């Protein structure tokens, strides 16, 4: 919660509207695109480790 949201919560008014705004912000942070990117990254890492176990060339550059 940002400072603006905190001060807004202290002001008398519509708590329901504040709760809806905060819920909408949380939904944006947990968007499907972030979940999809995490799944794709994990799949790439799993494939990379499998290649390493099989003796293939691992796609990691440690010297950078």
Image: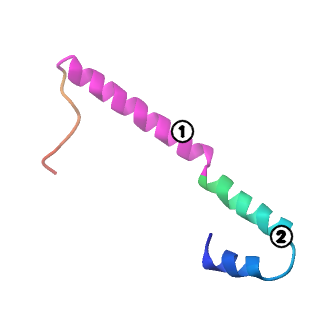
**Seen in the image, is 5 located left or right of residue 49?**
right
Quadrant of the rendered structure where residue 32 is? Answer: top right
> Is 26 a magenta residue?
no
Q: Nearer the viewer, residue 24 or 59?
A: 24
Q: Residue at x 83, y 70 (%)?
A: 15
Q: Residue at x 21, y 30 (%)?
A: 58
Outermost residue toward the left in this view: 63
**Seen in the image, is 60 located left or right of residue 43?**
left
Residue 27, position as x, y percentages in the image: 67, 53
Q: Where does the magenta region start and end? A: 30-55
Q: Residue at x 57, y 45 (%)?
A: 33
- Res. 15 mark: 2
> Is 45 a magenta residue?
yes
**Seen in the image, is 38 located left or right of residue 8?**
left
Q: CA distance from mark 2 to mark 1?
A: 33 Å
Quadrant of the rendered structure where residue 35 is? Answer: top right
Residue 17, position as x, y percentages in the image: 83, 67
Which residue lies under the disc numbered 1?
36
């Amino acid at each position: 919660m940002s400072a603006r949201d905190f001060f807004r919560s202290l002001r008398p008014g519509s708590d329901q509207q504040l709760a809806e705004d905060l819920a909408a912000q949380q939904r944006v942070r947990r968007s499907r695109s972030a979940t999809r990117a995490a799944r794709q990254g994990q799949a790439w890492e799993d494939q990379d480790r499998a290649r390493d176990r099989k003796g293939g060339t691992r796609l990691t550059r440690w010297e950078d």
